[in-house]
Amino acid sequence: MDERLKVYDEKMRKTVEYLSSDYSTIRAGRANPHVLDKIKVNYYGTPTPIQQVGNITVPEARMIQIAPWEKTLIKEIEKAIMASDVGITPSNDGSIIRLVFPELTEERRKDLVKEVKKKGEESKVAVRNIRRDGNDAFKKLAKEDVSEDQIKQLGDELQKMTDKFIKEIDKLVDEKSTEILKV
């Protein structure tokens, strides 16, 4: 692969990776510890990721358990979960916090699929913007004694790369939509 293309390949790859990690935080009826990834707990005045203040397990298909390493953190963890957009009220027994995921309604599933498709479309736009930036950069190469054939070849390679990443995004959207709609 041409060195000039690697930059754009890396940017497109990061866009797809970001979408994939973003999708892992969307709950699809089953308990997924990744829904807690963006939650920060006030740990002695410092916002700390929830994974760093306790042990997170999934004992059942629709339940997440958080066992804080310090019992005094239970209230802080509950407060952080309530303030987040997870949409689940935590319950605790004094030592363990439980998050029970309710079965998603049909309407909520459809809303989640719309959200998934919207995020997928935003990622496609980002990939196309990267392609546009690449094509603009390649056109400027004409001033640096690069032949038109080479510039056209770079543009063609960039288009193939764009098509590949757009297909990956479509695949991610389809997989997540299917996962959400599966009852």
Image: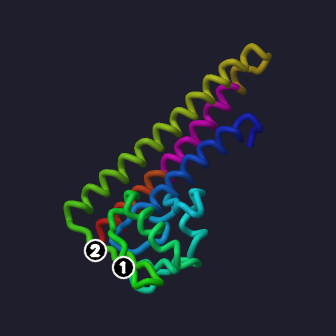
- Report the magenta residues as a range: 151-168
- Disc 1 secondary structure class: loop
- Asked whether 12 or 135 is in front, the reply is 12
Circles 1 and 2 in contact, beta carbons < 8 Å: yes
Q: At x 40% / y 61%, what residue is drawn?
A: 26
89 above or below 144?
Answer: below
Q: CA distance from mark 1 to mark 2?
A: 7 Å
- Disc 2 secondary structure class: loop
Label 1 vs 2, first from the N-terminus: 1
Q: At x 38% / y 65%, what residue is drawn?
A: 27
The residue where tag 2 is placed is 102
Q: Amino acid at mark 1?
A: Arg
22 is within the stretch colored magenta = no
Most frequent secondary structure within the magenta stretch: helix
Residue at the top extreme of this rendering: 143
- Quadrant where the C terminus sits is bottom left
3 above or below 23?
Answer: above
- Residue 47 image point, x, y percent: 57, 57
139 above or below 161?
Answer: above
Q: At x 49% / y 46%, what residue is drawn?
A: 166
Residue 62: image tag? 1
